[in-house]
Image (cartoon, helix red, strand yellow):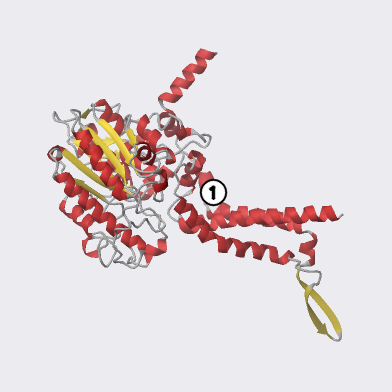
Amino acid sequence: MRKSKTMVGFLTTLILVLTTFVISIGIYINGNFENQNLDEMIYYLFNGLEGTSIDVLTSAIQTSVIPFMFTLFLLYLPILRPNKRKHSIELVFRKKKRAFSVFPINILYKFRLLYALGMFLLSLILCFYLLGIREYLNRLNDYSTIFEEYYISGKDIAITFPSEKRNLIILYLESLENTMISEENGGGWEYTVIPELENLAVQNINYSNTEQIGGALPITGTGWTVAGLVATTSGIPLKIPIHGNDYTSSDNFLAGAHTLGDVLEKEGYHLEFMVGSEAGFGGRSNYYTKHGGYEIFDVKTAIEEGKMLDTERAGWGFDDSHLFTWAKEEITELASQKEPFSFSFLTVNTHFPDGYLEGSAESNYESQYENVHAYSSKQVDEFVGWLKEQDFYDNTTLVILGDHLSMQDPEFYQSHLKSGYIRTIYNAIVNSPVEPIHPTNRNFTSLDMYPTILASIGVEIEGNRLGLGTNLFSTKETLVEELGYDYFNKELTKNSNFYNRNILQGDYLDLLNQSQVVGE
């Protein structure tokens, strides 16, 4: 009998701990990833967390430990029996005593295992709504024909390069949006945190949703780093098959897509991608090697080449000062070769929750996140200054893009922004041989940057559309302008037979079917 009670007590505790864990995860994700949906979470679960920063994990644990303990205490309180003495309230009414048990509640304590199971079920229901699982399941069963109607593959149209091919450098800035630019120039801050990036946008080509500095509107399937990279280089949102846990961990990464890397590789470009973390995180290395055969330089490369020790990792890998230093070396080497080159690299210091503040950075603002952005702005400006001094600069175009909106706590931005301000993703195109016709008052998304990047190096695109993106150097309407943002965004949230078969699987699926036929 004693063993039975002990087992009941153990199972009850175990289930309540699990219940608390589920509730804590739901609350943490809902509070810290307000702008993200379940698609992103499932994507990273399916693709592993290789290279995840220990700082992010540590921050999540530190933020959650007190709420976790408090929630567990509240769940355990009704059945808590600290000693043999009952904690009760006695009421006397007409000389009659009535006692009410407080700790434990007798009925709950007697059926404590059922109570724990009930709490676990309620926690699952809570997360079902908090994490948007219901909406996610609805989207899986709601199909769109947006791809059948509007998707353009680069394989099916003429893409014409100039006789003298230009070099292309794409600098992705982690979580960089226009919000910290001054209100005077179209940002959301009363003062400017990133004056150098602000000046780059003013003095060069900046595609904007307003008359002032602006940028791309966030849209479904583009709101995290890997998705942002895919969107700006293929014109499609990033979705994964529900029955494809190892999809992007194989060579089969968007096998049917025709991307920027595919186009440049066909034209004889030498391609390289550099990132300060591990390129395998989220399947990035698989995407770039599958589409264009990019050389990959990440933290593992830096360690293998003796540029740093494994013990010298800073957060994700190496900081942005090292990124820019080694990027200059790689670009110089690429420029010394006969072939045209395209070099893409991604900063990391401005990643949430508070960014990574290097020791040489100044602290002129109240928040670390602002100080990190301010230093990043200076680093980009110094890189642009270096680039302009190089012999190959005249034949090189630099495209600077934010990969997505920041994932920082929304309250951080709301405390600065005026009502009605629309947060957009940063862009600036430096040294393009093409002049924009209508760079302002354009409604567009990251999807439109794919054909726009090609056009920025003088490439002519038949019909001025690739993927679901539109060349912003042209007068052709983007799909957001043509269809309306709400409709277009809603269609992208839905499932797509065309996407699943022709883009996710593409040639891979055809080869698989052929091999099955041969096997039969």
**Label 1 is placed on what type of residue?**
Ile
**Residue at the image point whose x is 29% and y is 66% from the top:** 364
At which x and y percent is residue 372?
A: 32, 58
Front in this rendered view, residue 151 or 329: 329
The image quadrant of residue 275 is top left
- Residue 303 seen in render: yes
At which x and y percent is residue 205?
A: 18, 48
What is the crowding at mark 1: few (fewer than 14 residues within 10 Å), some, or many (at least 20)?
some
Considering the numbered disc 1 on the image, is that residue within a helix, a strand or a loop?
helix
> Mark 1 sits on what residue?
133
Residue 69 drawn above or below residue 507: below
**Residue 504 as seen in the image, left or right of residue 232:** right
**Residue 249 as seen in the image, left or right of residue 21:** left
- Residue 440 seen in render: no
At which x and y percent is residue 213?
A: 23, 56
Front in this rendered view, residue 420 or 316: 316
**Residue at the image point whose x is 51% and y is 60% from the top:** 62
The image quadrant of residue 279 is top left
For the N terminus, the image quarter is bottom right
For the C terminus, the image quarter is top right
